[in-house]
Image: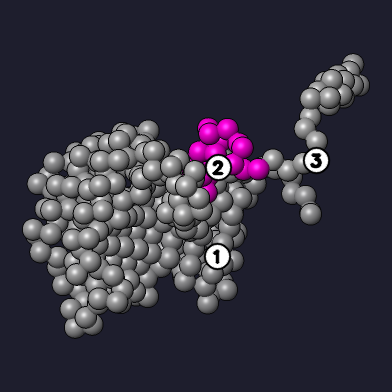
Amino acid sequence: MSLAAPHALEVKIDQNEPHRASNVMVSIHKLHLEILIMVFTLATKHWINEDFEDIGAEPVLSTTLASICSFWRGIILESPAFRSEIRLVLMGPLADKYYERAIVRAGRAQNAPLWIHVQDTTTDERPIDQNGEILPEHIITKMIQLLAPLMPSVYSLSIQFQQFSPDSTVQALLTSWIQHTSLDIAKRLDLFMSPELKEMEALVIPRGRDEMLSPTQVSAFLKKLPSVRIQNIAIHWRKPTFPGLTNLYVGFGLAITYVPYQQSISDILTASPQLRSLVMLDFFVMASFPAPTPVALDCLRQLKLETHFSQSVANVVSLISSTHAMHST
């Protein structure tokens, strides 16, 4: 019986052999439309699934594919999925242009999953003497008026601040997202604050503008969010904020407000047993006594630890184990 399955498989392959194409390479232009759309989608989107490896890679721009030929351009223009990346710049001379483009894309995207990227200003517009100022309230209101109707379809929310204080803006965006999102759609939160700004405090638990968010809403949202990428954010390590993660990227700020102990990191790993990617940069982790029991992360495929403190690397590595037998390659 043990030989029956391989033999059956060989027969099935042989039967299909006459139907195989020759060694002639098939032109991509002759591929079925649905296959082309799948290829374009894989090239232009971040994917968070069992094959997901690097949350930091930039996708190919749909405009790049559209410039190849008129046939590809027609596919891109007619498919809502390739108009689903919406970028906003809140301040500066380019802000109006980004808003106009965002309105057009929002109309074309229809119900496709959206990738929203919000930044306070472009890097070449940053007066050094204005770092840390709070954005005017009317700017935040304008942003929310545009994005709130789109939040039910937002797949990924990326917020990048280079100059202005991000607190009120981030709170407004997260509150709107949590209020209006479908928990099956929201997959990724990306927060980047410039090291030149003061490390942002505890934004990862939104207080809620006008107190419209209940703790139950916040908890349900955080439990369903699989991918988080944060940099220069003050995390309260004693209480894991994001349970159930599959991907976690943490870039520590230059001035760390809360230095985590091994036990805090262990609690995060314990809360996310399906973690597939763990990236920690510029970190410092203090030893706990007694040392926590290692956490089995059998799904972990990417582990990246970069810091000047070698003992901190050892303190994190010692927290990770696997129930699978280790094989050398």
Q: Is residue 164 magenta?
A: no
Residue under circle 3?
A: 23
Q: Which residue is mark 2?
A: 39
235 or 128, which is in the foreground?
128
Quadrant of the snapshot with the N terminus: top right
In the image, what residue type sits under mark 3? Asn
Label 1 – label 2 distance at C-alpha: 32 Å
Helix, strand or loop under label 2:
helix
Question: How many discs appear?
Answer: 3
Residue 98, numbered label: none
> Residue 108, percent across and down?
30, 40
Q: Is residue 99 left or right of residue 14?
A: left
Q: Residue 11 occupies which quadrant of the picture?
A: top right
Q: How is the image coloured?
A: one colour
The residue where tag 1 is placed is: 305
Q: Which residues are magenta?
A: 27-49
Closer mark to the observer between disc 1 and disc 2: 2
| CA gap, disc 3 and disc 1 | 44 Å
Dots 3 and 1: beta carbons under 8 Å? Answer: no
**Which residue is at a point 20% across and 39% down the rendered structure image?**
149
Look at 58% across and 32% down and name the residue there. Answer: 32
Q: Residues within 10 Å of mark 1 (few under 14, many from 20)?
A: some
